[in-house]
Amino acid sequence: MQAAAGDMTVIKADRVETITSGMIENGIIVIEDGRIKAIGNDVEIPETADIIDVSDKTVFPGLVNPSSRIGLSASPGGGPSSNPHYRIVDELYPHQDVYQRILRAGFTTVGLVPGGTGVTGQGAIVRPMGRKPEEMIVAESELLTIGFQANDSNKKIIKDALESAKSKTSSSDPRVKPLVNALQGKVPTFLTCRGPGEMLHLMKLLKPYGKMRLVLIAGSEKYRIAGQLADKKIPVVLPAQTDFEPPTRNRINVPAMLADAGVKIALRPRADTIQGHEDFFRQIAELVKSGLDQEIAKKAITIHPAEMLGVDYRLGSLEAGKDANLLILSGAPMDVGTRIHMVMMEGKIVHKAP
Amino acid sequence: MDGIQTNRVVYTYRLLLAVLSAFVALPLLADEPATAIKGGDLYTITSGIIKNGTILIEDGRISRIGQNVEVPKNAKVIDARGKVVMPGLVAATAEVGIAGFGSTNKIADSLDPFSNSVSMALASGVTTAFVSRGRPSDNNPIGGTNAVIKTTYGDLDNMLVREPVAENVTISSVEWLRKTNFLQNLRKAQNYLQKLDTYTRTKDNNRKQEEPKKPSGIDAYIRLLKRQLPARLQAATAGDILGILELVDEFGIRIILEEVVEGWIVAEEIAKRDVCVIITPRHKRRPNEDISGPSGSTLENAAILKKAGVKLAIVPTSPNFATWGIAGRDLITLPMEAAFAVSGGLDERTALEAITITAAEIIGVADRVGSLQVGKDADIIILDGHPFHHKTFVEVTLVNGKVLYEKKNSTYFAHIQHDN
Amino acid sequence: MVICLLIVGSSNAKDKPTSGRYAIKAGKILTMAPTEGFVVGKGVINNGIVLVSNEKIEALGPASSIQIPEGYVVIDASDRWVTPGIVEAHAHIGVAGGFNDMVTPINPELKLADSVDPEDISVRKGVTGGVTTVNTMPGSGTNLAGFTVIIKLDPSDPEKMILREYGAMKMTQAFNPERRAGDLGATRMGMSWYMRQILGQAKEYAEAWRAYERGERKEKPEYKLELEKMRKAFNGEMPTIVHTYSGWGVMQTMRMFSDENNLNVIPTHTAYGGYIVGDEAAKRDGVFINIGPRVIEFSRPTYDGRFHGMGAEYNKAGVKELSINTDAVGWSSFIAPQEELSFQASMSAHYGLDEREALKAVTINSARALDIDDRVGSLEVGKDADIVIKRGSLLDPATPVDLVLINGRIVYRRKGINLVAK
């Protein structure tokens, strides 16, 4: 591949985990203007490029956490309400250690979401750095979130909101447009609910709106409806932990169970805290050790969450054309001794281990 | 599914099928193979006991019952030799299937087919239950909602049978204002209906008449007066019961009475008004020393009510599935409560009916469940002994023809084996 | 002469009713005699006769071997079962005026015999379920509540109602007496200390008196009123019954009472997973496990999703003299009332306890635990004529009790049933 002039960086690494095209040994990544220009082990290195020689290290895509409330204020309480116009974008607080810390822990993309119940608003896809909210925002497109509980008032609020927006496809009303976008599948809709029974109610409620791109976020015992989720192609975001099979103390690996049933999974930290993020690789390794396929695990923390957020066109894997968001690791990502040596965000080194 | 196929082969096949189906009681419409339960003693409830009988299930319903039933070759066969086969039990009141979703105005919106209570219900042989949510509040005597559900684990779509099946009413001698409101609203509704009736009959002759305006807040009372739904009330003492019976006399409404601890004292009066009762035979109430007549509770309550001709269902002291350690007082052992009624003189047949067909009749779903009859839902339990024996366990539970519980494959009771 | 006595007895209504002389024709007798098991011909007698006189069982055996003396009133139970009266080892009935004096955590002076109330509803309701003897107790609000009283459920003669004034020493290991007012005894450490302290004092006191009475000690020990009652426990005149829960609690009870103080002890309740140390209980003579009102443990302490029958688990672990209680207090539907002690046994059998063990658990085993088996718990010559007649096993909830005798007197007769020959 020919490299052109410009602001160029080249990374030479022992191994490069592309996620979508397998693992490249003795890999070379050419980065220009914040994007991957070329990637392979037979790539021509431009003369003017800065070379980062990490030929004893492994390159991995930056981690994507699709659903978090880290750094946000408390969730609203009270009964369900419909606030499609509420935007996380308006609530960002960049001046917090928390974003620095999770960036250093390897997270280059985070989906921040509203809390509460009902139609809770629009999430935002951010990079955990920047001094102003605009600097954090990654993509224009956002996502709609619905917090569901199985009772008639909650169902009514959601149904009324969707029905009223159904016909107003050209509306620019900030209370209507996000719903229209969700109904048309232009943005994903993130769903939270508690048990599997509740999810059945929700699936039934949303059945008439076939174009919506639904993503299920966590909740308990979802493996009981794995078949239905796989059938309807609803991907699921799960915390990176094993659970007890109720009412016993038998450990079950729910991510593995869902993956085996054909459900697309993403994994997020076990706890939505700084520590949860810093500990993430170890949590993933634990899951792999107790039965989750390693390749699926790698996808679950990179390309799958990117797809669920609708930003896989630019993130989630190491491919030409995508953002140069990557981690330089001291070894294989799932190994216990592996440390993060460097974090690169859109071509710039934003963290280097001392 | 698609009937617009004109393919000749398909046509011929279907013709053949139609011809063949003339030789069986119901045509084999099902995509799924039939299920047959063979060799057990069938306690049909409505047609006696069929020894060494067979039940054929197709499409979730009972399609044949008898001693010489022909079973299709590809049918799934369940061996019930030496066992008792009964309809699934009907709990005339229960806390099941709607755990923990907060308050709701509609049970259908809050059913949880994965609830632990549903698993335990299946293990206990309870396949149909009356559930209620919300209560009358303040001085309003009618409130909340209720429904009949089935314990269809994992299946939300088939869980609800009907909502509502009654009006939840709470009035008693203690809450005098509620009773006043109840009576006044009934009268208001009655008054309105009479005016409406007059108007409807005479409006052609008298065009100047205005249609009477319906007062607000009386829809439930109209349903009661029109006997579309029964009122479900609690009354424990003889005095309270008599007070409720007066409502039947005055308004002709249908009533289901719960508690009815002193029903035995006024059994004839209850029977006269065709009121149904739901009782707990072991309910304890001390005799009232301040009155000269009989009072208090008795194990003979059920027998005396039955003798007077009162229709009764039986529920346990705790209408739930208890795991905290006390055994024999909740729905896990529903038949035991009926057994106590037998010890108080109730005949065994009526006692069995009280937890199956009569309970189904009282909660309004006897067209579908409560007995082993052709055409009814295949809600069936297979027991390892007589239901009133204290060591009997449910071994298999089917709902809508599907096996949803097997003792040997469930952690609950698989480890308990009885030799005798 | 016999006839005259009968006429005199019945015409003088003011006399306290006395026991009659009965010949009970029995379809099946279950003696529950400890040595006879359930062998037909020994513990189980088909077509038998029981003779009752002077409040006692005069004779019993196959009908062919017993001649009915003249003047004995015949009770025709030839299509029924005849069993011993049911013995309750743990209840709080037949008393009035409270059972928890909780100012101090240790109350060795109190005896419940002072509070017996023949009018309590559970006394007359209990016999409808065949219960004839009850160890009724102070509560579990303190670590040493006092002393229980063993009563017969026959209120006609209050003097005769008390079988033994000092039934058992009632103590509570934990799970209730935890002090909340900031005083010592809020923790298990504190409670254990209180108990060991008083037990130590009582043990020493009893030993001193024993030594004095044997002549080994010259100086007469100081008389301490508050320890006098405990002395009876240390002299083996009554067991100690201890409310306890969980594996920890049951072990602690066995350790503290049996191992350290050589007392006969009835660990009672023992739920929250206590059965897990059943094998330790089985090892110790003088430990009598008594379960109830909970008789099942769901998934506890094992997290295995199973309903464990506590009785079955103890039996499996080798516990031989298990007894079952109702813990009846008041008279309600929510937990077992006194008359449903047999049903507690039925449920224990349902959840896996061998049926014969379940029957023993509410008759001879309770009597043995309480050390009253010289009087009650089985049908044997010389024992009290406490007899239950019903159509069916004691464990069958669908058949009612028809007739009950206590001390040879008919105390309960089901309405409409008359088995007594004219």
Image: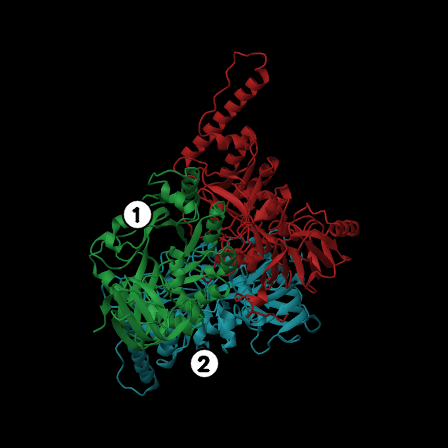
* Residue sitting nearer the eye, C128 or A33: A33
Query: Residue A305: x percent and y percent?
Result: 38, 60
Front position in the image: C76 or A210: A210
* Category of crowding for the residue at label 1, using alpha-carbon neighbours closer than 10 angstroms: few (below 14), some (14–19), many (at least 20): many
Q: Give the colour chain B carries in the figure.
A: red
Q: Chain of mark 2?
A: C
Residue C156 can be seen, yes or no: no
Residue A87: image tag: 1
In the rendering, what colour is chain C? cyan
What residue is pinned by disc 2?
A: C285
Q: Colour of chain A?
A: green
Q: Is residue C268 above or below residue C417?
A: below
Mark 2: secondary structure: loop
Between A51 and C326, the one nearer to me in the picture: A51
State which chain disc 1 sits on.
A
- Up-down: is B181 above or below C377? above
Please say if C323 is above or below A163.
Answer: below
Amino acid on which the number 2 mark rests in the picture = Asp
Which residue lies at the image location 39% right of the left edge and 44% below the top edge?
A: A179
| Closer to viewer: mark 2 or mark 1 | 1
Disc 2 from disc 1: Cα separation:
73 Å
Q: Is residue C280 visible?
A: yes
Label at residue C112: none
**Side of C273 where C100 appears, left or right:** left
